[in-house]
Image (cartoon, rainbow, N blue to C red):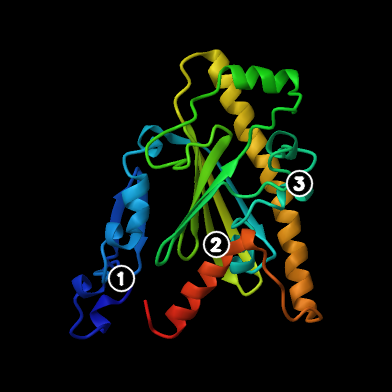
Amino acid sequence: MPGEVQFLDFDKRDYGLRALALDTWEKLIFVHPSHAPAQSLREWLGEVDANIAGGPLTSLTPSARFQAEVAVNWKVFSDAFCEAYHVGMIHRRGIAGSFISPANPHCHLAGIRLYRHHSIVSLLGGNPNHKPTPTELFVGKFGGGSYAKGINPERHPSWNFDTVNVFPNFGIYIGADFADSYNFWPIAADRTVWDVVIYQTTARNWSEAAAKNYFRVFVRDTLREDVNTTEATQQNLKAGIITRMPLSQQEVVLRHRYNVVERWLEGDR
């Protein structure tokens, strides 16, 4: 501290690093900007904690991380992950082949759980008519299970993963042996830093290691398709021509989220 004697009645101990509240949940670290938040982490998570704690997240470790600065408002960005009926169009060259089936041609959600602030939805895969590539056959041979505590409550045989939306800007996709977490960090009205972390079980042999690496690349390439669409959506909104947008019943999670936002704006938290 240059010229410290020039600061009268000064004690460095009064100007240390700001203390923040920190807690962990299922191997994830949460930081609160306040030293003493009104609620504990588990109180805030509420039903999410009751449903997910003790499930597959406890056996997963980080295996990859992707980060991108995207030209889109953070709310518009996170909204794009609240439904699955876009899969048939946006991901038609990728996951659509295995997700879209005659029984579920529009990739509708298998289940929805809405809470005071948060939500959990279940997504299906398992198209019986899909002809897997040799690589997909290899990956499937060394894949994991289908059920675990707290997820796939409908016990649907074609279930793929659950999406947990933690208000306001955190989401995590949870499968039986994998998870992807999303943080949407706003840095401007029309720019967002998107932080994605993939979690997997530890490979027991080289075959499993190759399959898990394929999965990481597969997720990365799928997410790239989502980025392109969200930036186009932001451009449309900035044009100001479209002033309102209808929502499908498949976007009930999105409806719920904005009800939560309105409650917060009115002081009802």
Q: Secondary structure at mark 3?
A: helix
Q: Nearer the viewer, residue 244 or 57?
A: 244
Residue under pointer 1: 34
239 left or right of 164? right
Q: Callout 1: few (<14), some (14-19), or many (20+) C-alpha neighbours within 10 Å?
A: few
In primary-sequence order, the first of circles 3 and 1 is 1
Mark 1 vs mark 2, foreground winner is 2
Determine the residue positioned at 47% across, 33% down.
Answer: 176
Give, as a three-letter code, the residue at label 1.
Ser
Residue under pointer 3: 88
Residue under pointer 2: 253
Q: Secondary structure at mark 1?
A: loop
Determine the residue positioned at 44% across, 42% down.
Answer: 153
Q: Secondary structure at mark 2?
A: helix
Give, as a three-letter code, the residue at label 3.
Gly
Residue 94, given in percent of the width and then of the height, sits at 75, 38
**Marks 1 and 2, Cα distance to the nearest angstrom?**
28 Å
**Marks 2 and 3, Cα distance to the nearest angstrom?**
19 Å
